[in-house]
Image (cartoon, coloured by chain):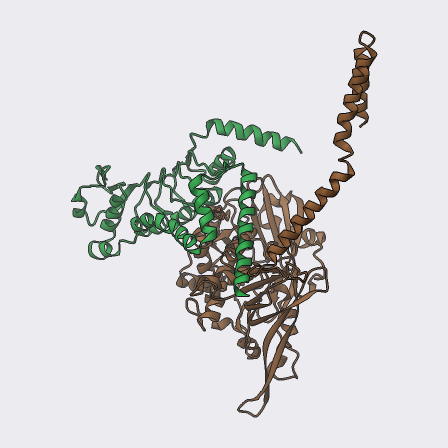
């Protein structure tokens, strides 16, 4: 406003004394008039009619909305509430949850054959394990199930645009890095590596064993002290962008008609049927009828009536299972066996080292447990390590312990690759593992006592790389009644009841 | 109730698709879709039938690629690996040379070729030129049995991607020359897999449009494959541009 006035003033002074004062008066009048029209608005009377017109218009719109056939109701409804009824509720919208949702829709026989709802607590995925992971995929496991899961997932990722392309959207670009994994073994674990290699070759994974000399020849920048044997994945191994995969699954599933809801599962309404088994013991079977979904930042909740619940809540799946009473039964009964999944915090550090190894850096896993991989081409690397069993960090927050890098990781890192002796930690983050405290392997299958809860959890850090295949397996279990392509019955909950751990004989 | 629900879902979908399209166009400043695309888009949102038919299009487009790259199991069973490879390469309108021979077998523009190669059952294939063909990852099944393959030219192959490169490790002891210029799908992630090719002497990576920083990548490639002569023509002006850009970026912070 002041500038405008200033402009008028300069105009007036510029006209100066040569012009009639009347003319100057007229000019300023014009200016002020124009100014008024812009800022102070219209006269009050015409405003009234305009408002009335608008109100009529709004009323007409509302009336047309209330006509039969429209979805208008006189009650105010929260649009973000989940639907009242769904066939399958998937608890947890991480990569596993969305993968299951996608495969369920993929396998349905008719359109809208199953109503699938995915409930995710955090719309920003700020604490989701999926996006905070290092994003690797490898076949170098000892358990055939894990190897097959990885192979199937790699196959899926290769053809990702045949599976997850959406009409009128751009194709998915995973930014897959085919650098492979390099596992290093010392003399204590070399024989395990050799056995694992046999299993992997038998399962069809392309993995090569390297002696220290061959290793030095292939990667001259590695210090081979203490290394007796190394195994390098040649194909289908590397790392990719987890967020892209999660989003691709989500985009495709939503386009196929999966319902998405941001809210927290706070409880279940379930029925209990007591039965007596052949030994005369009483066994209580639960069946979930409703899932209570609470809206974020409010007390409002919606019970969702459902037939099947899939527990894919990752690190929090132990808590979700407890809500149905899993693990809360009397001692020495089946009901006392809880889901042994708990969150474990793991740190990932981004380090900058301009003299570090280049394009050929594989995903190195040292026998000490330290891992490192390249991140981009600018001399950045990400590294991490699992802490010792007794020194687990506090899992209440996602704060990073900077000391951990200095004390635990760096010595191993600098010893293995001498170029990392001088480096700079650029940033770091922490994420949760859905750690299976029983045997560090996935729990996939139906719970024997809650006979409509399926479990897909406890991956202990391999969830992202196994997600496409696990999603398919769970969808087969639900819709076909059994595993069709990959038999994962060894990874069922039964092994926990029988106390028969299926351990990964890995060197790390 | 059901009808109202479907209507609601339809309308939600309608809105969401519109939202996404508008976002895309705003981010990339694409031209508005042509009348035909716009009409198809509208119809696909309106009718499930149209949507389904449209979703078949990529599958139909890929049909030729799939047919070209089937596994030549029958030929392999009856005539051996070498003939299967030869037949596959010729069917792709490519060319090859048997070990110990100087003449190349090639198919002409119409895909016609000389059947004399059938007489060389026992000679392994040494050089393969499948440039500007539809070879892809599955088609590689027909080549992996060749233990003497020394030269492979994949110039201008639209279906060759990073997964293809990662599978070239089967030739790690023999492959000496590789030409992957003008392949539109190759990125840095696939080039890293060339580390496995131990005896590679010559590599042509000219004109790869999806490589972000060609100058840097070529340097890294040369560092990764010290024995190998890396050719990267066609990036010239691009190289300079990228260099100055990355330099200025490096200096900025």
Residue A33 vs A190, above or below: the answer is: above
Q: Where is residue A216 in the image (x, y as percent from the top left)?
A: 49, 47
In this rendering, does residue A472 appear at all?
A: yes
Q: Nearer the viewer, residue B208 or A498?
A: B208
Which chain is painted in brown?
A: A
Residue occupying the point 68% across, 66% down: A301
Query: Split into 4 quadrants, where in the image is the N terminus of chain A?
Result: top right
Query: Split into 4 quadrants, where in the image is the C terminus of chain A?
Result: bottom right
Residue A312 vs B118, above or below: the answer is: below
Colour displayed for chain B in the image of the structure: green
Residue occupying the point 41% across, 66% down: A485
Which of the 4 quarters of the picture holds residue B106? top left
Which of the 4 quarters of the picture holds residue A297? bottom right
Q: Position of residue A73 (x, y in %)?
A: 63, 62
Q: Nearer the viewer, residue B24 or A48?
A: A48
Question: Residue A185 vs residue A429: left or right?
Answer: left
Q: Where is residue B231 in the image (x, y as percent from the top left)?
A: 41, 33
- Seen as rendered, the residue at the extreme bottom is A280
Residue occupying the point 33% across, 41% down: B152
Q: Where is residue A398 in the image (x, y as percent from the top left)?
A: 70, 56
Which of the 4 quarters of the picture holds residue A274? bottom right
Residue B204 vs B135, above or below: the answer is: above
Residue occupying the point 53% across, 91% down: A278
Residue A58 vs A344, above or below: the answer is: above
In this rendering, does residue A488 appear at all?
A: no
Question: Residue B136 vs residue A17: left or right?
Answer: left
Question: Residue B132 vs residue A308: left or right?
Answer: left
């Amino acid at each position: 406003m002041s500038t405008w006035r200033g402009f008028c003033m300069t105009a007036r002074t510029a006209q100066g004394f040569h012009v009639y004062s009347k003319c100057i008066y007229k000019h300023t009048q014009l200016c002020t008039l124009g100014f008024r029209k812009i800022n102070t608005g219209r006269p009050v009377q015409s405003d009234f009619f305009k408002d009335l017109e608008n109100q009529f218009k709004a009323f007409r719109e509302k009336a047309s909305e209330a006509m039969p056939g429209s979805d208008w109701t006189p009650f105010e409804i929260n649009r973000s509430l989940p639907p009242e009824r769904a066939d399958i509720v998937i608890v947890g919208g991480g990569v596993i949850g969305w993968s299951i949702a996608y495969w369920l829709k993929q396998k349905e026989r008719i359109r809208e054959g199953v109503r699938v709802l995915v409930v995710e607590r955090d719309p920003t995925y700020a604490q989701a394990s999926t996006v905070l992971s290092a994003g690797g995929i490898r076949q170098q496991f000892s358990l055939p199930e894990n190897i097959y899961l990885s192979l199937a997932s790699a196959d899926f990722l290769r053809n990702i645009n045949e599976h997850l392309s959406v009409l009128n959207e751009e194709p998915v670009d995973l930014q897959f890095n085919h650098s492979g994994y390099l596992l290093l073994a010392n003399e204590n674990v070399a024989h395990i590596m050799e056995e694992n290699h046999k299993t992997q070759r038998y399962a069809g994974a392309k993995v090569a064993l390297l002696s220290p000399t061959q290793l030095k020849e292939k990667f001259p920048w590695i210090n081979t002290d203490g290394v007796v044997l190394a195994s390098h994945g040649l194909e289908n191994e590397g790392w990719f962008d987890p967020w892209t995969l999660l989003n691709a699954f989500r985009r495709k599933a939503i386009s196929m008609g999966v319902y998405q809801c941001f809210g927290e599962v706070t409880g279940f309404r379930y029925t209990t049927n007591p039965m007596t088994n052949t030994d005369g013991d009483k066994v209580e079977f639960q069946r979930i009828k409703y899932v209570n979904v609470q809206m974020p930042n409010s007390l409002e909740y919606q019970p969702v009536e459902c037939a099947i619940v899939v527990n894919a809540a990752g690190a929090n799946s132990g808590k979700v299972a407890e809500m149905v009473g899993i693990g809360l039964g009397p001692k020495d009964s089946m009901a006392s066996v809880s889901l042994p999944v708990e969150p474990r915090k793991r740190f990932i550090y981004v380090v900058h080292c301009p003299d570090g190894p280049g394009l050929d850096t594989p995903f190195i896993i040292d026998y000490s447990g330290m891992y490192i991989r390249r991140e981009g081409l600018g001399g950045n690397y990400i590294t991490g390590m699992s802490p010792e069993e007794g020194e687990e960090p506090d899992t209440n927050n996602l704060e990073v312990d900077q000391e951990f890098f200095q004390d635990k990781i760096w010595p191993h890192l600098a010893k293995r690759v001498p170029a990392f002796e001088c480096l700079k930690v650029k940033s770091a983050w922490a994420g949760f593992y859905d750690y299976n405290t029983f045997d560090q392997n996935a729990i996939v299958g139906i719970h024997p006592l809650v006979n409509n809860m399926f479990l897909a959890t406890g991956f202990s850090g391999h969830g992202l790389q196994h997600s496409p295949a696990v999603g398919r397996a769970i969808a087969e279990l639900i819709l076909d009644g059994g595993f069709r392509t990959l038999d994962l019955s060894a990874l069922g909950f039964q092994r926990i009841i029988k106390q028969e751990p299926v351990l990964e004989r890995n060197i790390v | 109730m059901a009808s109202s629900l479907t209507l609601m879902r339809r309308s939600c979908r309608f809105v969401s698709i519109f939202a996404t399209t508008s976002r895309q166009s705003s981010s990339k400043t694409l031209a508005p879709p042509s009348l035909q695309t716009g009409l198809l888009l509208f119809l696909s949102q309106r009718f499930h039938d149209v949507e389904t038919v449209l979703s078949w299009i990529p599958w139909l487009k890929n049909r030729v690629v799939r047919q070209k790259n089937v596994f030549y199991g029958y030929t392999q069973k009856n005539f051996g690996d070498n003939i299967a490879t030869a037949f596959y390469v010729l069917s792709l309108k490519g060319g090859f040379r048997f070990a110990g021979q100087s003449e190349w077998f090639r198919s002409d523009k119409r895909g016609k070729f000389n059947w004399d190669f059938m007489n060389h059952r026992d000679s392994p294939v040494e050089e393969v030129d499948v440039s500007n063909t539809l070879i892809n990852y599955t088609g590689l099944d027909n080549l992996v049995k060749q233990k003497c393959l020394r030269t492979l030219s994949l110039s201008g192959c639209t279906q060759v991607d990073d997964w293809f490169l990662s599978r070239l490790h089967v030739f790690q002891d023999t492959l000496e020359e590789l030409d992957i210029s003008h392949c539109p799908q190759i990125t840095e992630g696939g080039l890293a897999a060339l580390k496995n090719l131990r005896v590679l002497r010559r590599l042509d990576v000219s004109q790869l449009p999806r490589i972000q920083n060609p100058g840097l990548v070529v340097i890294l490639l040369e560092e990764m494959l010290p024995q190998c002569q890396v050719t990267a023509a066609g990036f010239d002006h691009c190289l300079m541009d990228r260099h100055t850009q990355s330099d200025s970026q490096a200096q900025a912070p």
